[in-house]
């Protein structure tokens, strides 16, 4: 078994261990920013299919190199309007929708023969000036716009809470996100994904209701 497979198996075991007994295991999104295509290929050979990228051009380069594999591509970084066409045409998920003007651009560019682009609304849950994401009270407006746009499918919410050293404060942000997700799901039953938690806190996020965790350094080692 390769080192990548061992690390993947260990991460999946931690995810399963953090899950409530009556809940489905949270999904693992491998955050592959800065990783070469060969590393993604190795992890794909171990069974990992979903990869998250922060930068559109870097992701497109990897997609070309890995076109022979059946992979699922998520954009998790901020999206500029001039990249909407590339994202709509070459990604399966957008996890970082944060403003209304992107919605019609994405919908117009999605090819009608493809399944809808899965969309998560990014929420700036701790109101950090340095973070992307909409305010919590803007979620419903964005949700209505996505659901009204052909070619897009509203799937849920994403957040990157502030990395407070106090675990209780981090957990409180995760719980607030879960409450927002439950409200969204009550109004839009197709919403089934709450993406929160990264390498340093994904077990806490799962305990607070995350259905997807975005893990990079725990899989690939510290960023170089």
Image (cartoon, rainbow, N blue to C red):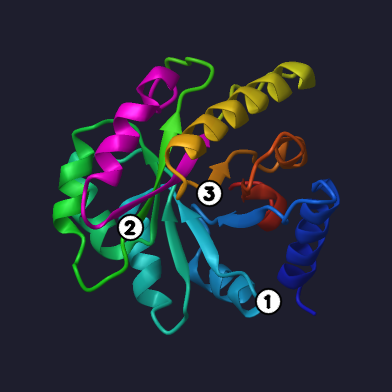
Query: What residue appears at the point 56 percent right and 34 percent down from the top-left corner?
Result: 182
- Judged from the image, the secondary structure of the residue bearing numbered disc 3 is loop
Q: Is residue 28 above or below residue 158?
A: below
Give how far across and how far down residue 37 sits, in percent: 48, 69
Q: Nearer the viewer, residue 65 or 183?
A: 183
- Numbered circle sitting on residue 81: none
Q: To which quarter of the image does residue 114 belong?
A: bottom left
Q: How far separated are the C-alphas under marks 2 and 3?
A: 15 Å
Residue pointed to by mark 2: 117
Query: What residue appears at the point 29 percent right and 64 percent down from the top-left corner?
Result: 90
**Left/right of residue 68 with respect to residue 196 in the rendered view:** left
Mark 3 burial class by Cα count in 10 Å: few <14, some 14-19, many 20+: some
Q: To which quarter of the image does residue 219 belong?
A: bottom right
Give how far across and how far down residue 8 sits, in percent: 73, 64
Give how far across and how far down residue 52 sits, in percent: 49, 54
Q: To which quarter of the image does residue 130 belong?
A: top left
Q: Is residue 197 above or below residue 37?
A: above
Query: What residue appears at the point 67 percent right and 26 percent down from the top-left corner?
Result: 175
Give how far across and how far down residue 210 sits, in percent: 65, 41
| The residue stretch that appears in magenta | 130-159
Of the two numbered discs 2 and 1 in the rendering, the one whose residue sits closer to the viewer: 2
Residue pointed to by mark 3: 192
Q: Residue 131 lies in magenta, yes or no? A: yes
Residue pointed to by mark 1: 46
Q: Are marks 2 and 3 in contact (CB under 8 Å)?
A: no
Q: Residue 5 lies in magenta, yes or no? A: no
């Amino acid at each position: 078994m390769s080192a990548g497979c061992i690390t993947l198996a260990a991460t999946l075991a931690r995810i399963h261990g953090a899950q409530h007994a009556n809940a489905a295991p949270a999904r693992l999104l491998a955050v592959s920013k800065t990783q070469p295509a060969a590393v993604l290929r190795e992890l794909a050979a171990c069974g990992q299919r979903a990869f998250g990228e922060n930068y559109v051009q870097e992701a497109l380069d990897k997609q070309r190199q890995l076109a022979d594999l059946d992979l699922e591509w998520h954009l998790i970084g901020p999206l500029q309007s001039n990249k909407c066409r590339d994202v709509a045409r070459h990604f399966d998920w957008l996890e970082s929708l944060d403003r209304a003007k992107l919605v019609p651009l994405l919908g117009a560019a999605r090819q009608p023969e493809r399944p809808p682009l899965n969309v998560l609304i990014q929420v700036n849950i701790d109101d950090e000036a340095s973070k992307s994401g909409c305010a919590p009270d803007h979620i419903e407006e964005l949700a209505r716009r996505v659901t009204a746009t052909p070619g897009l499918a509203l799937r849920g919410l994403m957040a990157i809470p502030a990395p407070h050293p106090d675990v209780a404060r981090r957990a409180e942000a995760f719980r607030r996100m879960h409450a927002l997700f439950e409200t969204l799901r009550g109004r839009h039953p197709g919403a089934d994904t709450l993406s929160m938690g990264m390498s340093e806190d994904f077990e806490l996020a799962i305990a607070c209701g995350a259905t997807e965790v975005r893990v990079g350094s725990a899989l690939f080692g510290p960023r170089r």
